[in-house]
Image (spheres, helix red, strand yellow):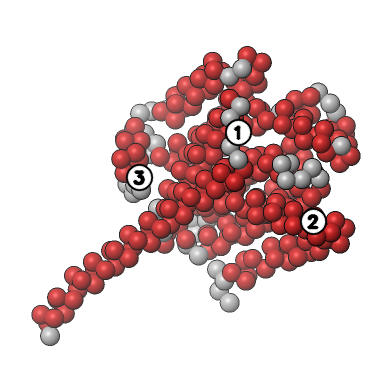
């Protein structure tokens, strides 16, 4: 059985899903089991484009760091990002102690959900600017030669020749947010957006620095040492940015924090497995525009998070479907172009063979 065989990659996610699903079904009944399934699907839907981007970064890490991504990384993704981090954000927004907020989450989930919604500007400003800068970093690359949406991507690639253009654009975005949001949110939004910009730029720059300056690569060319650590942390922060919308949206489905953690946690396992599958199967190399679609989806999600700062709420089904629409369209375009090129190649070869005969 080869390394990219689906069974080798997805069996553990299947096992975890069955075990947790059985526990939820026994203690909560069929209604709770159905919500568990819905939450898992919600998580995968929100994070499908995340898996595409993760696979691009993960393929450059050494086998050791890839294993850490699946072990330590999944612990961070499930328990720290989807349970502890929202509690910390509520603690930051309300001034309550961590223990009190945990008590609210478990014993008074409706109050906890309301406080989490009140803290949403912190999440939206940070996550929105982080994802927006990630998307812009991909398109504002003057060395990028393959373009999907040519009329948009080519000018963006040329603009990438301007030094620090990404930081200039994002600084203007942060300033625009500060000037246009509600007065009571100005300071919160400015600080959160600046942290998102600095964190994305800093982690990416550190990984490049360690790789180029200190040669943190092994004989196979995979990242090791501090370069691998910086990339690993970049993956975890990226996962956190994608998960915030799912966590908040989950409270529209159920108020049970434990059920939310279980459902979103299982979804996170599936996203990790999907990341490994995409990496080992070489999916990005097979489908030319898939990576482009994923980055357009990231830009769209980042904009959706920033729009929420102006009290514009899109249905969860719309937000979750954005990534699938972009990735699905990019995938279809890649397949059609590949078939067209194959047909042209066959048509070109046929007359040659006829003349030879």
**Residue 286: percent from left, percent from top:** 41, 62
Left/right of residue 322 with respect to residue 30 in the rendered view: left
Q: Residue at x 46, y 54 (%)?
A: 328
User: Which one is nearer the viewer's eye here, 19 or 278?
Assistant: 19
Secondary structure of residue under mark 3: loop
Q: Residue at x 57, y 56 (%)?
A: 275
Please say if 267 is above or below 194: below
Left/right of residue 155 with respect to residue 216 in the rendered view: left
Classed neighbour count for the residue bearing mark 1: other residues with Cα under 10 Å, few (<14), some (14–19), many (≥20): few
Using the rendered image of the protein, determine whether residue 324 is visible from the camera's viewpoint.
yes
Q: Looking at the image, which residue sits at the far bottom?
A: 357
Task: Compute the Cα span from label 1 to label 2.
Answer: 27 Å
Task: Compute the Cα span from label 2 to label 3.
Answer: 44 Å
Marks 1 and 2, the one that precedes in the sequence:
2
**Residue 115: percent from left, percent from top:** 77, 30
Secondary structure of residue under mark 1: loop
User: Which one is nearer the viewer's eye here, 213 or 78?
Assistant: 78
Please say if 37 is above or below 303: below
Classed neighbour count for the residue bearing mark 2: other residues with Cα under 10 Å, few (<14), some (14–19), many (≥20): few
**Residue 30: percent from left, percent from top:** 80, 60
Please say if 353 is above or below 337: below
Identify residue for label 2: 31
**Residue 149 shows which numbered tag?**
3
Q: Residue at x 88, y 32 (%)?
A: 100
Classed neighbour count for the residue bearing mark 3: other residues with Cα under 10 Å, few (<14), some (14–19), many (≥20): few
Q: Nearer the viewer, mark 2 or mark 3?
A: 2
């Amino acid at each position: 059985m080869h390394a990219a065989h689906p069974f080798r990659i997805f069996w553990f996610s299947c096992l975890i899903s069955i075990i947790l699903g059985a526990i939820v079904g026994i203690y909560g009944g069929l209604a709770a089991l159905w919500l568990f399934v819905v939450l898992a699907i919600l998580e995968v839907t929100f994070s499908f484009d995340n898996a595409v981007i993760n696979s691009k970064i993960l393929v450059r890490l050494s086998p050791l760091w890839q294993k850490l991504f699946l072990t330590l990384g999944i612990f961070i993704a499930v328990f720290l990002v989807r349970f502890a981090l929202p509690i910390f954000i509520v603690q930051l927004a309300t001034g309550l102690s961590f223990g009190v907020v945990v008590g609210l989450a478990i014993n008074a989930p409706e109050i906890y959900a309301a406080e989490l919604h009140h803290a949403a500007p912190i999440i939206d400003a940070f996550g929105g600017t982080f994802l927006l800068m990630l998307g812009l970093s991909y398109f504002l690359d003057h060395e990028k030669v393959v373009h999907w949406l040519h009329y948009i991507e080519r000018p963006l690639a040329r603009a990438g020749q301007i030094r620090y253009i990404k930081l200039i654009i994002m600084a203007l975005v942060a300033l625009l947010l500060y000037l246009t949001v509600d007065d009571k949110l100005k300071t919160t939004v400015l600080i959160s957006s600046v942290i998102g910009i600095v964190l994305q730029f800093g982690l990416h720059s550190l990984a490049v620095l360690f790789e180029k300056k200190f040669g943190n690569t092994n004989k196979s060319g995979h990242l090791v040492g501090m370069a691998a650590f910086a990339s690993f942390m970049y993956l975890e922060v990226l996962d956190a940015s994608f998960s915030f919308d799912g966590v908040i949206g989950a409270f529209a489905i159920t108020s049970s924090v434990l059920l939310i953690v279980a459902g979103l946690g299982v979804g996170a396992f599936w996203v990790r497995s999907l990341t490994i599958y995409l990496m080992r199967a070489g999916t990005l190399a097979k489908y030319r525009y898939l990576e482009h679609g994923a980055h357009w989806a990231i830009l769209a999600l980042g904009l959706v998070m920033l729009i929420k700062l102006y009290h514009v709420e899109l249905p969860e089904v719309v937000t979750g479907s954005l990534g699938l629409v972009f990735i699905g369209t990019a995938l279809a375009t890649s397949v059609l172009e590949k078939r067209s090129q194959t047909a042209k190649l066959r048509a070109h070869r046929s007359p040659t063979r006829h003349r030879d005969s």
